[in-house]
Image (cartoon, rainbow, N blue to C red):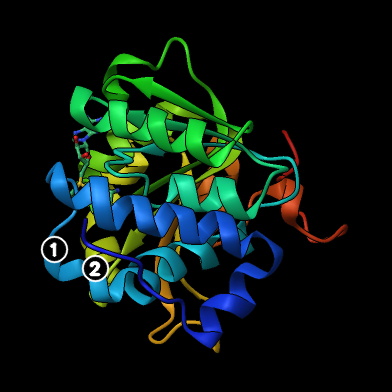
Amino acid sequence: MTGHVVPSEGARELFGEVLPVAQRYADLLADAGVERGLIGPREVPRLWERHLMNCAVVEELLPKGADVIDIGSGAGLPGVVLGILRPDLAVTLLEPLLRRTVFLEECVDLLGLENVTVRRGRAEEVRRELRADFVTARAVAPLPRLAGWALPLLREGGSLLAMKGEQAEAELDAARQDLSKQRPCVADVIRVGGGKVNPATTVVRVTVTTELEAGTSKATPPRSQRAPGGRKKRGRKR
Ligand SMILES: C[S@@+](CC[C@H](N)C(=O)[O-])C[C@H]1O[C@@H](n2cnc3c(N)ncnc32)[C@H](O)[C@@H]1O
């Protein structure tokens, strides 16, 4: 048994009334997660700051009642954390490896997460069955490959939220052409959780649009999110 990792004051504030559930999850990661090789022992002292809190702040980007597929959930990051913090979300943890899905099932049962489902499989194999408003992913694949897996799972107007490191802007710039070939979309880099986590969590957001919307700007939000009257006029037909 590796032990109980005490949450910081910041973690207490961030998780609020669901802190005991988050604490139970941290303990599962520190014990069974380490024993089964799902998380490195050196991560244990920084479980709250680097893993749970860093994932938790992504909830700022998720509207009430959204459904979310977490691709490559591993030991449950960020999907389990989002499911704990936001009971209004319907979260599917998508993970191909049996050892990991067994752990995820145990977490869902032990934590009583009725809004979280575990699905064993690869993202590229489930595109006929699963659809969502949002796809999340952390440390799963380079952006072009990740987008190739995620964009087919999204409804129009939906977004991939890819948690990335400090090089997110460069990664996105290098991937832009590739992304637009896959599906009409707009993309930007946003930082969430400023003042709650340090550093703030960096997210590459890729939103699926119509052809017309994708052509207007590289970071224009889809029409459904724009203020009335902000629409581009079409040219007159001759
Ligand atoms: C480095 S781990 C990251 C796990 C977790 N997201 C985290 O941040 O701790 C990458 C995970 O992606 C999963 N994965 C790899 N290819 C995948 C695919 N095609 N579809 C879904 N998951 C995949 C792996 O099995 C692994 O659990």
Residue at left offset 44%, top offset 62%: 55
> Would residue 231 appear left or right of 73 to someone viewing this image?
right
How many numbered dots are placed on residues in this image? 2
User: In the image, residue 34 lies at what x, y percent?
Assistant: 18, 52
Distance in Å between CA atoms under marks 1 and 2: 6 Å
Residue at left offset 39%, top offset 31%: 106
Q: Quadrant of the C terminus?
A: top right
Dot 1 corresponds to which residue?
Answer: 41
102 vs 164, nearest the viewer:
102
User: In the image, residue 92 lies at what x, y percent?
Assistant: 49, 30
Dot 2 corresponds to which residue?
Answer: 44
User: In the image, residue 112 lies at what x, y percent?
Assistant: 59, 36
The amino acid beneath tag 1 is Pro
The yes-or-no answer for disc 1 within 8 Å of ligand 1 is no
Callout 1: SS: helix
Q: Quadrant of the N terminus?
A: bottom left
Vertical placement of residue 8 versus 62, above or below: below
Vertical placement of residue 19 versus 14, above or below: above
The answer to whether marks 1 and 2 mark residues whose Cβ atoms lie closer than 8 Å is yes
Q: Quadrant of ligand 1?
A: top left
> Would residue 104 appear left or right of 154 to someone viewing this image?
left
Q: Which residue reaches farthest right?
A: 228
Q: Residue 54, located in which quarter of the rendered image?
A: bottom left
> Is residue 232 visible to us here?
no
